[in-house]
Amino acid sequence: MKFPTPIFALAMLFAFSPSFAQRSPDWSVNLTGKAQQIIFQSLTGVPIIQTDKSYIGIDPVAQKVAWTVDRKAGKLISATLGADGYDFYNMTGTPFVLISNNVIDSRSGAAVVSKEKNNYKTADDYEVIPALNSVLLRVTAGNGVLRLYLIGMADAKVKWEVDVMKPSLITGMNEEPEEEHADVPLFTSLVTPDHYLVYRYRKNLAVVSPEGKLLWSEKADPAEVMLSPDGKKVITVKALVTGIGNSPVSVRYVTKYRSAKMQAFDLKTGKESWKSDIKVDQNIRWADAQPDFLVVAWKNGCNIFKYATGEAIWKDDFKGKRVVDVRSNEKGYLVTFESGYKTMQLDKSGTELWKKPQVLETDDEDADDLPEEGNMDVYQYAKGKILVDAERVRFRPAKGSGMKKWRMSLNAGSRIAYDDSLHNLIILHDNRLHVLNPDNNPQVVKSFKDNFENLPAFHTVEFRANAYFLTSPKEFIVFEPATEKLTHRYYVRPFDVQGMFIDMVNAELASNQALFNCKATHNAQTGAWKAERASAGLLPPGSGNTELQKADQQWRAADALEFASTLMPPARVEAFRQSRDFAWYFTKDKSGNVLIKVNKDTGAEADRLIFDDARPIYQVDEIQRRVYYASNNVLKVF
């Protein structure tokens, strides 16, 4: 008999013997202590075995133990950095892991930063800094000072360390509660073109020189921080002190609200650059640092300001609700407002040149239930615009298009993504997959229904050559736009198996990062990633936030992903290129507990691995075609 794939042998292996008696493993190693769990480092793919006595890094090429780090008995793997009772954290997006508050290079087992050697109490947080090819580690030093380490990800060396804030700046009355941690908080800090680092923590702001010298630290209480175009000024939107404001922003994982004030600091000295703060009529909705002027918009208007002095360029504020854009042109400035419905041309002094605003996209004068606040995503088509906010999606036909208005209500469980290539807007809502494209469909939307189990759990869509692959931990949808064929499958798990099998982090790296940094309106891929596949986060409606024009962060995220791929071992990169067309789902059926391999283009099952135990100590590395099985103090590799 001729077997279709080599993996079939693995399926038979697990099917016939819980003790692998059918054949011997390809190789095995003895472990220090009793095996408890198998972990793959999130970026390098290095297998790390947790035993009751140690963490053990495996070199699968040399087929041996590469390194061993002792651990504290009874400790568990942590979901958050520095969590009490845990001694291991997988530092996603870096080649490092954290073991007992020590930063360990997963490639060598060497301690890059050590709690004992470097004299600190806890490692509290980290941030990937793509512009510096580094990771920024925050620790609490022995005297309570907040300390930063900048660690190169390629060479695993500390570039600099600096104490940035004293306890008196960090603690005090009426402070926010301790913030929650995120896995990979990209772009919280800012880096100037000449590598000065602008760092934020709670109410504090600090600037560190390229050599690692603290230039200044200030209790500025920023809700948002930006750089002037010349990189010489740090500009902040001040946070509200108390109460509920509009337009929340996340600053080091604590939700803050913009006030009506802005201030600027000299990058190198920390001295205030403006004689007076910018003060506007209402709380600021957004601010945009354009090359020649600073735009500041609030609910009912906007103005533009000089970087040098903070003075308003227009004598009078422009009055118009929900300004979304201000652009300079030959006549002066074109302001777009009412969330994209209207424009007004101003001269260079800010005086209106038109008698009334120009209505852009529709004959219909009814501006029904526009959101007073919050984000609105705008998708432009030849025949009109699709506007999406948190509660509804609406189509506004263009003049002369012959199209009719269309609308649909949404809710918190709705999910949305946009295909830049085919210009299809994808919405998961009300147990249906909706595909919107008014240029191709006179009815605007086509809807497809199936027995979907949990659409709000879907987190990623891959725009493949001929299909969309939408996935959640237990469920997938394959939709082929050309034929409108839909394939759907839901897999019931025998138990919560989160973190048990490799999550294909290399194959899904772009998708996972997209959920942190990328908006639903664009694909954050460059280079090889963009040429071969594209992914986007399936996000709640309105979270695309096109008003604030943050698309540049998507491409910065793509740059980070491209750099991250260079840290993978070359053999793993090549293996990844050959295996990313599949997804894995763990379930239970008549055969027992099975790990099912699914083709992302067709939805067909390509393979099954049958396990002898609903809670096995297994890990499947499909990327490099290995199965790791730990029993007591022995690791067997097939």
Image (cartoon, grey):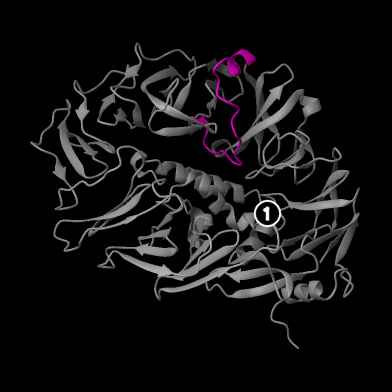
Tell me what residue is drawn at x 77 percent, y 72 percent: 10
Q: Residue at x 14, y 43 (%)?
A: 358
The C terminus lies in quadrant = bottom right
Looking at the rendering, the stretch of residues picked out in magenta corresponds to 166-191
| Amino acid type, mark 1 | Gln
Q: Is residue 626 magenta?
A: no
Residue marked by disc 1: 498
Q: Residue furthest bottom?
A: 1
Q: Main secondary structure of the magenta part?
A: loop
Q: Is 547 on the left or on the right of 139, as rendered?
A: left
Give the residue drawn at x 46%, y 69%: 479
Outermost residue, top side = 275
Q: Quadrant of the N terminus?
A: bottom right
- Secondary structure, mark 1, is loop
Q: Residue 185 lies in magenta, yes or no? A: yes
> Relative to residue 23, is residue 247 depicted above or below?
above
Q: Residue pushed farthest left?
A: 355
Q: Is residue 582 above or below residue 380?
A: below
Q: Is residue 159 left or right of residue 270?
A: right
